[in-house]
Image: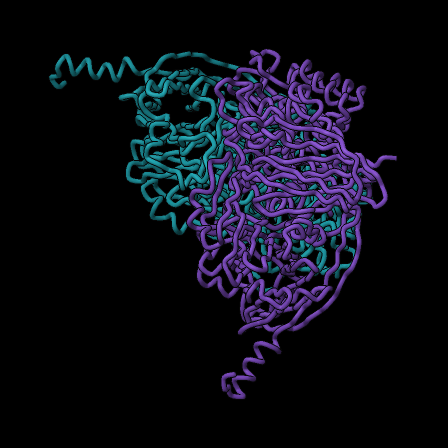
Chain colours: A purple, B cyan
């Protein structure tokens, strides 16, 4: 030990001890130290004594005024004295803990456990006499923290220039990431070291209908892995993003450091805040086991319990849709050949039909018949309403009215027909990004839904947002998404939003907001394809804060079936499509292909018919980001289990150990596996189905082909 | 005559004759020539053979794409090929004319005459194969013209970079103008030559709650005068500004030229257009007589007739208000001492009252008593609803809910009380510029109005607009104002908007939109004062496209009455305040002072009680912009007349010739005039009232003191 003076010792004690607070997780394995270093707040994170996150800075930068105009014009250096990132002393400290069990309305397990120790430090900035609180919750699977702004004399309204919450890792790590963009998440995941992110960044995206990239920044949830003898998996995300913009992560590649980067509005402001207020939680989930990261419910735990008084209308929904045939180009959303229509003025009955309008009475009845016969709860129909002729790319504010059907869509007849068959139609509200227009029509649109017996709506936000200049993940737009969810609740309607912000656990607070797209889904198989490992990464990223409407189930994976010479194909085997229903948690669950394709493989389709969408239990049997996912789930209120396994671009063997089954019970397993000669490019539809009696002592070995999988449905033998 | 070659002659004929179209007014005094000069469109205007407007260019510049993002970043020179301002040939020409009489629902005369000759030229730009129409209407008082964009293969959607409609005057002229600003018109008028506008510009404005100035540009309506032996008065304005931004006028001071400058949105775009579409009309009203310019109904004539099926609920309204006492600072809009309130969360009954809340049950009943006793139809109450504690300056989107009263405002009791006295309350919807929030609440807000028997609302837009980045006069915000008017019509509610865009004749199409502020009104007497000539200019500018809610009638002009030492005062005599009820057309007509001040001058108040607000006839007896206005009006459905005269900072004599009265009829005139020793600064409340029997042969001479006036109410003696 070096010789140090007493003074230096005291000095370091002052800064290391007196101003430091330690928090431990309930099981003691995690430790977080908070400290002020010369008035600047830092936190860190240790797991089993080893540093996971080095001392990382916290703070925010503010604008001078509380109603800024055109931030780019008023960014002045003297604004720095308004920043809440330095000059602090700790004036208070409160500790708390919680260990509760709660039941999600729809979930992967019957019970979610919320168990943490909490530390809230109050920091006062003497120069401005303003106080903030930094609140930490340390769980047995990692850390969440947020800022709180109490209402006080000197802090009532402020505008955020940027939040600067850092996460400083001690070493390089493998990362699975997509480029940061204020308007889209529809990108292929990249697998690189943190240090390589800037090198890869420029090649990591293609065009998008609405795009505002942030160079050398990535989106969250972000998945990381410290490789080596004792691997550690780390997930960086956020929870409860409400009345605040979504955050991206700027990369300091050489220092393995990330920093929050909030979504701006057009003025360059990053949040208009009125106290008392709280920020979202910044979450860091950590485990030596990838499976445990995927299984974490931290993000949901950090959201508030719902205030809804009635959630009885919320139910899991298996559905089909008049949709995929438009995505691949076989038919159209639009009814007529017109290039330019004026809602409320154009007489659609006088337009020339294009002959390719999918949402017509005849076709919809066929879909209804098939979906109803096969036990689905819902049928989505896109293109039912006027306005599709010129819906995209013109910044047209009054683009849809959400209530006027096309001449060939008899809304009353079709709903009556569906109900007579025991199925509901699912409404479609494509907004074209015109959020102000959607808000104007939402009451009438939801009233129409109630009138005709729809209880679920898929919304869409394709294209730039109106109010022009707002982004998909700006504070204003996020408020819009939750205003719609709240209004839908008044009408007892479930919401599934596409091209919206990714959920960050809000299904706990808004349980009718049952799903969202908000990532690159199955439709992209027709728009360039998804990498073979895409579905092995999404559960570690997009799914962390809520279910995704991935819309799988494509049996006719090669599109040259429709268009000779077409090179597009869904980059998986047919069986992998089945497995996705288990490896992906989807309470709103689509069988996306055309009925004619299912009819040709009713034996394989049986799995989709049987698989549940709501669960009493989930076990991640094995998972490695970018490689494979093997999941088992127990259907709610039953003793039935489903198992799904998928692999990336590599063939892979996996032995399922059925010890999760009840002991002493016999089960019949129906197994769906890749055929021996199956190949996702050359022979995707080769599969093998067989039944087998199993018990908790059984094991079955599977040989997944590249981008293949297996699926098992298991029911007890009485 | 110079010797010219045949070729040169033919050449000039080609450009002067073959490509020129001439239009004349119905009485032949005006002539307009349209021509293409090397493919660029020009128009001019002549009156009695003399050039009023020299050949002036027309055209628009467009952006390349129809859904532009962040115009400032994509302004590229190659976009010029998308401009619609050159390369034209004339492909069609249509002529039309109209001579109709129509009745405004509320107006200055029973009948408005709409008489014009019309020329519509179709111009095709061969390089892009796009056609536009320029339509001219030549009236007996001047010219209106607009662009029309037919729906066509190559023109469906476009975004305007700028409209470049020029008005090129041959000589310098005197101009009465206010600075151009995308967000406010609350400025003092400047009187300078056109050539002097840039010199004066920087001194021509003070601060405003929402301000986005455009240097060296001015607003329209703009009043001009060519001085000299044969003076000519010219008014430059626009009509029917709908689904388009409002235009300002850039000044080329050395060439006495103006050019349209549209209000931008935050992206820098100046209009998102879907064809078929038309622009507003650009209007040029001309007369050797200033009175005839003021009297012109061209701007209303250029608007479309209303489609409203029921206008019976629309009526002239004389009202008082719980308002002026807040404006001067005697009381407050807010109820409590809180600095920061959350609608829907804050319990207002638990807050500490500030003791200055004007909109309380006791005071409101006192105002109701006085207003009802004195024959008013309505009482406006501001500050009745929760949210005023932090309503301004924080860009707070959910700033008001428009339905929750403060604890001391019993909405049911007060409305019942008012109705028992034969008066209605007038609703107040201050939006704080948060237009998206107002649209969200407008149905509930209007339902509340219907429930409690309100039939008129004053709206306000103090502060920057939300959607953030939009301006008060952007296309989006203008659409908002008319969406509100249309929705109000569904609920049979009349609208009076403050801080909104100035009307440009839309009361013809939206007759329930009965007034607006949209200029510097009486409240500014308490915020720095209005120049003594202000009210002699406004009828030539602000009033050209519609009535202004000027809110006059202040008897206690000096505010030191309330606050000893206060130097603020209303810069007119008391009698001038009376005269304003006639010189200003106000179908919604406020007596703005406190009842206690009227009680002290019930003899003068009698004029305000008697004056009508709706008219069968109006005669501008004499008017000179910036100097004086003398107006006579005949009350609707009666033989009663009212005369008002006002002067600027100069004392002035005027002799009223009563030849407008019916011949052979005796009338009793009650005359209100400045006292001999009256002075607007030192002795504003000195006045003289007397009665006199008059006939159409009578004349009366008035000696108005500086910023003084006279008012006469005349009724037939049976």
- For residue A111, above or below residue A614: below
Residue shown at 56% from the left, 33% from the top? A462
Q: Which residue appears at 45% of the width and 52% of the height?
A: A196
Residue beneath the point at 66% across and 14% down: A408
Camera-side residue: B238 or A620?
A: A620
* Outermost residue, right side: A718
Question: Where residue A84 sits: x, y (%)?
Answer: 56, 64
Query: Which quadrant of the figure contains the C terminus of chain B?
Result: top right
Give whichever of A118, A112 is nearer the camera. A112
Q: Which residue in the rendered view is the most extreme toward the left?
A: B3
Picture coordinates of residue A270 (x, y %)?
54, 51
**Residue B429 appears in the picture as rendered:** yes
Residue in front for this viewpoint, B483 or B31: B483
Q: Quadrant of the N terminus of chain B?
A: top left
> x%, y% of residue A436?
60, 36
Residue B698, position in %: x, y?
A: 55, 30
Which image quarter: residue A122? bottom right
Position of residue A34 in the picture relative to residue A370 (left or right): left
């Amino acid at each position: 030990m070096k010789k140090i003076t007493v003074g230096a010792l005291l000095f370091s004690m002052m800064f290391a001890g007196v101003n430091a607070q330690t928090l431990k997780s309930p099981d003691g394995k995690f430790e977080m130290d908070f400290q002020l270093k010369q008035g600047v707040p830092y936190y860190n994170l240790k797991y089993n004594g080893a540093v996971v996150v080095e001392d990382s800075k916290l703070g925010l930068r503010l604008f001078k005024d509380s109603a800024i105009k055109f931030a780019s014009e008023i960014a002045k250096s003297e604004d720095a004295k308004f920043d809440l990132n330095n000059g602090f002393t700790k004036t208070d400290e409160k500790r708390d803990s919680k260990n509760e069990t709660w039941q999600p309305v729809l979930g992967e397990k019957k019970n979610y456990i919320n168990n943490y120790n909490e530390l809230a430090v109050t920091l006062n900035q003497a120069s401005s006499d303003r106080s903030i609180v930094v609140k930490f919750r340390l769980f047995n699977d990692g850390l969440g923290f947020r800022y709180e702004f109490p209402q006080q004399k000197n802090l009532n309204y402020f505008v955020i220039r940027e939040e600067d919450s850092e996460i400083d890792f001690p070493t390089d790590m493998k990362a699975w990431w997509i480029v940061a963009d204020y308007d889209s998440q529809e990108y292929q995941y990249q697998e690189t070291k943190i240090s390589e992110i800037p090198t890869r960044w420029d090649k990591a995206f293609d065009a998008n209908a609405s795009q505002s990239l942030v160079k050398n920044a990535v989106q969250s949830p972000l998945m990381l892995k410290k490789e080596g003898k004792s691997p550690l998996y780390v997930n960086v995300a956020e929870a409860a993003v409400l009345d605040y913009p979504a955050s991206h992560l700027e990369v300091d590649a050489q220092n393995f450091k990330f920093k929050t980067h909030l979504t701006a509005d057009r003025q360059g402001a990053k949040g208009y805040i009125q106290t008392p207020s709280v920020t979202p939680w910044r979450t860091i989930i950590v485990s030596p086991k990838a499976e445990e990261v995927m299984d974490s419910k931290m993000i949901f735990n950090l959201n508030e319990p719902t205030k809804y008084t009635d959630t009885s209308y919320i139910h899991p929904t298996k559905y089909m849709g008049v949709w995929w045939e438009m995505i691949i180009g076989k038919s159209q959303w639009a009814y007529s050949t017109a290039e330019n229509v004026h809602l409320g003025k154009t007489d659609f009955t006088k337009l020339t039909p294009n002959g390719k309008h999918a949402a017509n009475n005849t076709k919809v009845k066929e879909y209804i018949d098939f979906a109803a016969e096969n036990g689905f709860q819902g049928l989505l129909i896109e293109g039912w309403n006027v306005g599709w002729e010129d819906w995209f790319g013109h910044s047209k504010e009054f683009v849809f009215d959400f209530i006027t059907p096309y001449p060939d869509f008899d809304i009353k007849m079709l709903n009556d027909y569906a109900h007579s068959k025991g199925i509901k139609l699912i409404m479609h509200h494509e907004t074209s990004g015109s959020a102000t227009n959607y808000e104007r029509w939402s009451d009438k649109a939801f009233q129409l839904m109630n009138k005709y017996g729809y209880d679920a709506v898929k919304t869409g936000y394709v294209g730039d947002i109106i109010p022009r200049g707002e982004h998909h993940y700006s504070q204003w737009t996020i408020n819009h998404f939750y205003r719609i969810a709240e209004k839908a609740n008044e009408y007892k309607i479930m919401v599934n939003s596409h091209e919206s912000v990714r959920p960050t656990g809000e299904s706990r607070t808004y349980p009718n907001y049952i799903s969202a797209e908000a990532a690159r889904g199955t439709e992209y198989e027709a728009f360039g394809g998804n990498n073979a490992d895409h579905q092995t990464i999404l559960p570690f990223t997009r799914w962390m804060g809520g279910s995704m409407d991935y819309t799988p189930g494509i049996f006719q994976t090669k599109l040259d079936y429709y268009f000779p010479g077409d090179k597009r194909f869904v980059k998986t085997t047919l069986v992998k499509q089945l497995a996705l229903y288990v490896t992906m948690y989807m309470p709103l669950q689509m069988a996306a292909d055309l009925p004619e394709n299912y009819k040709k493989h009713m034996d394989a389709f049986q799995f989709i018919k049987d698989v549940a969408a709501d669960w009493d239990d989930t076990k991640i049997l094995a998972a490695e980001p970018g490689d494979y996912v093997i999941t088992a789930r127990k259907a709610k209120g039953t003793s039935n289990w489903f198992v799904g396994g998928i692999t990336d671009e590599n063939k892979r063997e996996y032995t399922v150990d059925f010890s999760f089954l009840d002991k002493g019970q016999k089960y019949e397993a129906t197994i769906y596996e890749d055929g021996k000669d199956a190949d996702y490019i050359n022979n995707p539809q080769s599969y093998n189905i067989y039944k087998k009696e199993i018990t908790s002592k059984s094991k079955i070995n599977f040989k997944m082909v590249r981008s293949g999988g297996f699926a098992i449905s298991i029911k007890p033998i009485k």
